Image (tube, rainbow, N blue to C red):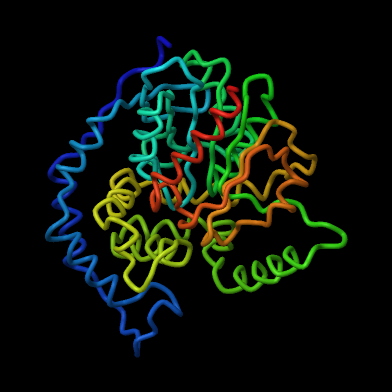
Amino acid sequence: MDQLRPFRIEFSPRAIDDLRRRLGATRWPDIGWDTGWSTGTNDGVLRELVGYWARDYDWPAWQARLNQRSHIRGPDEDGEIHAMVSLGSAARLPIMLIHGWPGSFVEHLESSRLLAEAGFDVIVPSLPGFGFSEPARAPGMSPERIADRLHRFMLELGYERYGVQGGDWGGHIAPLIARRHPEAVVGVHVNFAMGAPADDPTEEERAFLDFRARFERGETGYSWIQRSKPQTLGYGLTDSPTGLLAWILEKFWAWSDHGDDLWETFDRDLLLTNVMIYWLTGSITSAARIYSERDRTPRPTERLEVPTGYAKYPKEPWAAPRSMVERAYNVVHYAEPPRGGHFAAMEQPELFASDVAAFFRGLGR
């Protein structure tokens, strides 16, 4: 505990002036004709959002709002890790909420508050290389290594037994923590799980596998780039805030539950705050490296026996049928929320927090 210290988010007005200068100097492409979202980020939506970001978005107010929450940062042998911490009012199980890409701890700004109000201690770390957690300085920062680091972080906080929750990369890392440290993890809750296929899949499983094959052909080019050439991509996205926003915004459209207007699902200021974490820390390259690091390590194939909760949101593209997930995990809690997608905690924080709380309370009983 002596090494962990309070942390405040502080960026100078010069950083915001530089951002606005760059936004104003955006060199826009000639897209030829209106393609909507079919060939990438919607040009009209992006131009409008860039204008809002440059003129109306209030980073000092959001920085102050983020600093109303408790933040800590501390070292281990691999560098500094940041976390947002919300303490509950009752002696209940601590829960670690693990974000993914292109998210950040900002995804859990509301859900962590709701879970703390329900009595849980809630720890929301920034993954290594994301936001305020220091990037790796050498190869090897795989999801397995990240899992071990986050476990040590919880021990440093004084939590010998805790629960873990994850979506996106958190959906990979949370189960890894449980596999590698089952003595510490009392339960795993995921809203991202691809499960295990069967030799003779059910009709529902075949439909999902067919959908996923189509989806991955059309929607996962970003992953192949970040797995193979994250550094090349990083130069452009670190230099251009408009490029960074376009790269991230497309995923919020493609993976979430929304109608024609994205802002009926997301608060645009909150989405921009998430992008600001990448922009101000210059962490898009180090964050993208997690994709290439995963490819260097084998993936576990044995079933996870730690009690697992699975929330299958209707617009989560990687939400496998329950039967597939039960082959890979010891599912003791299952839910199908009526709304939500890949960014469930950000899209539907009340539904998300309610289901996570129900799972961990159930384990307590």
Question: Who's the residue at 35% across and 75% down the image?
Answer: 42
| Residue 76 position within the rendered picture, expressed as x and y whole percent measured from the top left | 50, 21
Instruction: Pick the residue in front: 72 or 307.
Output: 307
In depth, the one of 27 and 247 nearer the eye is 247
Q: Residue at x 25, y 33 (%)?
A: 9
Q: Which percent across, then down, holds residue 156?
A: 49, 15
Q: Residue at x 41, y 61 (%)?
A: 252
- Compared to residue 44, the image places residue 73 above or below, namely above
Please tell me whether residue 163 is drawn above or below residue 249 in the rendered image.
above
Residue lying furthest front: 365
Q: Quadrant of residue 178?
A: top right
Picture coordinates of residue 318 (x, y %)?
A: 60, 58
| Residue 257 point in image, percent of width and height | 44, 63
Q: Is residue 133 left or right of residue 318?
A: left
Write the residue at 57% across / 24% down: 151
Residue 274 lies left or right of residue 232; in this view the side is left
Taking the image as shown, residue 356 lies to the left or right of residue 74, namely right
Q: Nearer the viewer, residue 46 or 198?
A: 198
Q: Who is closer to the viewer here, 190 or 91?
A: 91
Label total for image = 0
Q: Considering the image in quadrants, where does the N terminus appear?
A: top left
Q: Quadrant of the C terminus?
A: top right
Rendered position, 256 above or below 71: below
| Residue furthest to the right | 199
Above or below residue 155? Residue 169 is below
Residue that sits furthest to the bottom in the current view: 33
Q: Residue furthest top?
A: 2
